Image (spheres, helix red, strand yellow):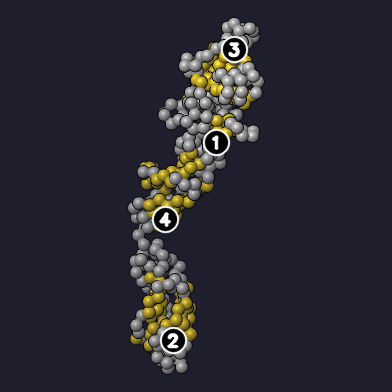
Amino acid sequence: NTVARNLAPRGSALLAGGYDEAVIVTNNVFSSASGSTVECDALYDPSPPSFRNNLSHAVSGPAWVGCDPTGADGNLSADPGFVDPSGSPGDFRVSPGSPAVDAGSNGAPGVPAVDLEGNHRIADGNRDAQALIDLGAYELNAPDAPVAPTAASAAGSATVTWGPPSTDGGWPITGYVVTPYVGFYGLAPTTFTSTATTQVVSGLSNGTTYRFRVQATNAVGTGSFSRVTNPVTPAAPTAPDAPMIGGATAGNGTATVSWTAPAADGGSPITGYVVTPYVGYWSGTPRVFSSTATTQTVTGLTNGGTYRFRVQAINAVGPSAYSRVTNPVTPTA
């Protein structure tokens, strides 16, 4: 249980007395806004209950009155580290790092499997390889698994995209971990300290097929794995495909040539185009345009001459194959 922010002047969280049989109080967080927090009243019962694995905290009064088991049987007197104890209505989950985390007993009778929000109570809350119960009624867990991951390859890398988990475990997601797999073998994971749900995994080998799984992280820890992505195979970039030629129109000593960008850039962005004029079957001086615009004007042509043009796309690898030739045009003054 979690009992907090009551205003009774005595035993605002627990006033113990009047029991007809032996009572064991275990796995609770008691916190008072004023007055004493836990008070054992000898007037009603000279034999107080047994306290095991409890935390008592008082804002302005004593944590224990008439009994003080602090330091024995797992009992604590400390601030429980609630997420927002002063808000309205307040958030009385314990924060990561709280002394109530992993401080309870799994063997106590009647401990429910989940807390009041449906989170599993037995979890390694402080990541020390011991799965114990947090004191109180509310647990903070690592996030659920991200959903529907997909992957797309590039040269030496892959872009992985996923949906956020359905629940964050009660604490905001701070990042994601993406693990590549070759066959069934997991490789070194990449940690992203960002809530973005699309990330680039670099350092992959071209020609090797990879799949990926994703985990979400919050202040409690790293959650479970997502399902595996589709397979992708990074490849070294190549020159682009050839542009699809449009047409040419003549001007005064010029011609304006248009085309459509290649269907594939070869895995490297297109950075420009080369336009080569032809007179009959003889090629003239190519014009290089460091622009991705797909309409350019070729100057320095001879009026009265008939020209056709072919276009190449350029990326970091080099120029593509030639496009088909344009219609013939004759510049005039």
Q: Are marks 1 and 2 in contact (CB under 8 Å)?
A: no
Amino acid of disc 2: Thr
Mark 2 vs mark 3, CA separation in Å: 101 Å
Determine the residue positioned at 55% across, 16% down: 64
Q: Describe the element under mark 3 as helix, strand or loop.
A: strand
Q: Which mark is residue 153?
A: 4
Determine the residue positioned at 61% across, 23% down: 34
In the image, residue 31 sits, relative to residue 235, either above or below, namely: above
Q: Which mark is residue 254?
A: 2
Q: Is residue 203 left or right of residue 122?
A: left
Mark 3 vs mark 4, CA separation in Å: 67 Å
Q: Residue furthest front?
A: 60
Residue 6 x %, y %: 64, 24
Question: Could you tell me how many numbered marks the image carries?
Answer: 4
Mark 3 or 4, nearer chain start: 3
Q: Which mark is residue 170?
A: 1
